[in-house]
Amino acid sequence: MAKTKPPVEKNQIIELEFSDLTHEGNGVGKIDGYPLFVPYALPGEKGKVKVVKVKKNFGYGRLMELTEESPERVKPECEVYRQCGGCQLQHMSYHMQLEMKHKQVTDALRKIGHITDVPVHPVIGMDEPWRYRNKVQIPVGEREGGLVAGFYQKRSHRIIDMNTCLIQDEDNDRMVETVRIIAEKAGIQPYDEEKHRGVLRHIMVRTGQKTKDIMVVLITRTRDLPHKRKIIEGIRKAVPNVKSIVQNVNPKRTNVIMGEETRVLWGDEYIYDEIGGIRFAISARSFYQVNPTQTEKLYNKALEYARLSGDETVIDAYCGIGTISLFLAQRAKKVYGVEVVPEAVDDAKRNARLNGMDNVEFFVGEAEKVMPWWKAQGLRPDVIVVDPPRKGCDEKLLEAIVDMQPDRVVYVSCNPSTLARDLKFLEEHGFETKEVQPVDMFPQTSHVECVSQIVRKGEAGS
């Protein structure tokens, strides 16, 4: 059978009408059924496209000129939007962003999970979808003899010198620039990743949204930080409400930002923040949600789906620093949290003490190994909550959930594809998905979080 040749060739310029979006937000247009993926194009638009890559079943194009614009197109607010790549969706209206994310979730459930009859509610968006991030990590480099701090250019390690990032807290923005100037005046050498030389690799700033506490973290290649006192004095003078100045040492040739050693240069080891009336201690290396406004909405929905009356035993797998666990502990009889990262479990225990909660316990270990041990000890949870990384739940963890037979499972997900895969497994093993609520935790980007309510078939009220 003869191979069918794609109807386009590399470098060809064609007229294209766009009918859809990919999950990354690229426009999709078809030529004789052959799809071309084109960044910055929107459904309903027409334009001239240069074909830049041709594969057997699809290709990629570059938008050269728009001949018909969508009413949903908006002018990007950010000056370096196209170079940076940190945000993918600033060229589309916020309404369209939410519609795209809803479709991303429903498509994944249908295509991967074969789940078609479950309500997927409209995405919970933000009233003000800018300036929401409470943590920024900016690489530092050198240009024309001076220090530059900015995000990497798309698909490269070239730093874009930038004055502001519109999805970062404004205090964080100002703080990064302040630290850059102070470090430059002190003569601190930026890290050169090609030669593996220099001192300052990244500047990280964390801000408590409710408390306005500020932590500055200087991530260095060397343990020695020249002019340390001068830098500390400069930061304290420039930012009176800074609570913590920390150095993290990362001597390795790696893309991983933080190293193993962290030490406080001045102030406290922790800053504090609140979500839903619960107080959290946050260290330089703590995992803490970057959008507390939306996190509260996400966790309140998880709490609603858990349907707690005060008599339940709950397991929180992948508990992190205990954020969801403590929300659940407000209404549950007992919560058991399990997490593989020992430092996170230490933080979780500290946060429980901070809030005077004695009905929650935290354990270090892999949930898929700890949960069968708990079952052997006679623990039977009424509710299991999971909030896994992007790769989703380990299949052994799903098997442990099935084995424990909870009445309800609440699945918090940052990846609709792995969520759909895992829901399919649970549906095939005696559980039923009742509803899914997407939440926009990262406006202007293509990411979407979801919380799903799952019940055991035959459970009262299912």
Image: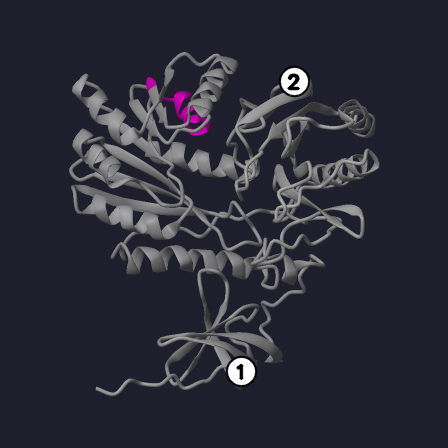
Mark 2 vs mark 1: give the one in front: 1
* The quarter of the displayed image where residue 131 is located: top right
Sequence-earlier tag: 2 or 1: 1
Residue picked out by circle 1: 11
* Residue 441 visible from this viewpoint: yes
* Quadrant that contains the N terminus: bottom left
Q: Where are the magenta residues, as a range?
A: 322-334
Where does the image place residue 449, in percent across and percent down from the top left?
44, 46
Q: Disc 2 residue type?
A: Asp
* Distance between mark 2 and mark 1 Cα atoms: 57 Å
Where does the image place residue 379, in percent across and percent down from the top left?
22, 19
Q: Which mark is residue 268?
A: 2
* Residue 271 visible from this viewpoint: no
Q: Disc 1 residue type?
A: Asn
- Judging from the image, what secondary structure is the residue with disc 2 in? loop
Where does the image place residue 170, in percent across and percent down from the top left?
71, 41
The reply to whether the magenta stretch includes residue 414 is: no
